[in-house]
Amino acid sequence: MTTTATDKAAPEVQGVPITMSEKAAAEVRRYISQQEADGVKEKIYLRMAVKGGGCSGFKYGLDLDTVIRQDKDEVFEIHGVPIVVDRRSLMYLQGASVEYYDELNRRGFLINNPNARTHCGCGSSFSM
């Protein structure tokens, strides 16, 4: 989790460009509750990002964060989960959905991105 100084809150986005399943939201809320129980006093957000890297060129980032950068971030809420996405990443995430799986052969978060042209074999990176 990032611990740099918090800037003023970014304005909330009116049209939510990303969707999230109820199951994924419940899991994120569980992680946030754990952080709060561990003593984090600041508001905690799910930070979504797209970064260069991986075998296909881009990779996703999901992390908990307490920092909002007024000049770079967009903020919105889905199923009670406060989400922060930097504007550059938001270009790549328009229409994406976040799912959570807790099955025998698949566990964790999965981002389904309709903008991605190809994915690597393990599914952790993509190309546009």
Image: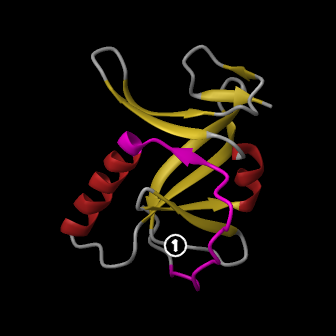
Would you say 46 lies left or right of 97 here? Answer: left
Pinpoint residue 112: horizontal percent, then vertical percent: 60, 31
Question: Callout 1: 10 Å neighbours few (<14), some, many (20+)?
Answer: many
Residue furthest to the bottom:
8
Q: Is residue 88 magenta?
A: no
- Residue tagged 1: 67
Q: Give the colour scheme of this rendering.
A: secondary structure
Q: Nearer the viewer, residue 16 or 40?
A: 16
Pinpoint residue 61: horizontal percent, then vertical percent: 55, 45
Q: Residue at x 46, y 52 (%)?
A: 63
Q: Residue at x 39, y 49 (%)?
A: 25
Residue furthest to the left:
37
* Relative to 101, residue 3 above or below: below
Which span is picked out in magenta? 5-24
* Relative to 10, residue 57 above or below: above
Pinpoint residue 8: horizontal percent, then vertical percent: 58, 86
* Relative to 10, residue 91 above or below: above
For residue 76, which quarter of the picture? Answer: bottom right
Would you say 48 lies left or right of 52 here? Answer: left
Q: Nearer the viewer, residue 99 or 58?
A: 99
Would you say 72 lies left or right of 28 here? Answer: right
Would you say 107 lies left or right of 81 here? Answer: left
Q: Main secondary structure of the magenta part?
A: loop
Query: What residue type is disc 1 on?
Result: Val
Pinpoint residue 23: horizontal percent, then vertical percent: 36, 40
Say which element carries label 1.
loop
* Relative to 33, residue 112 above or below: above
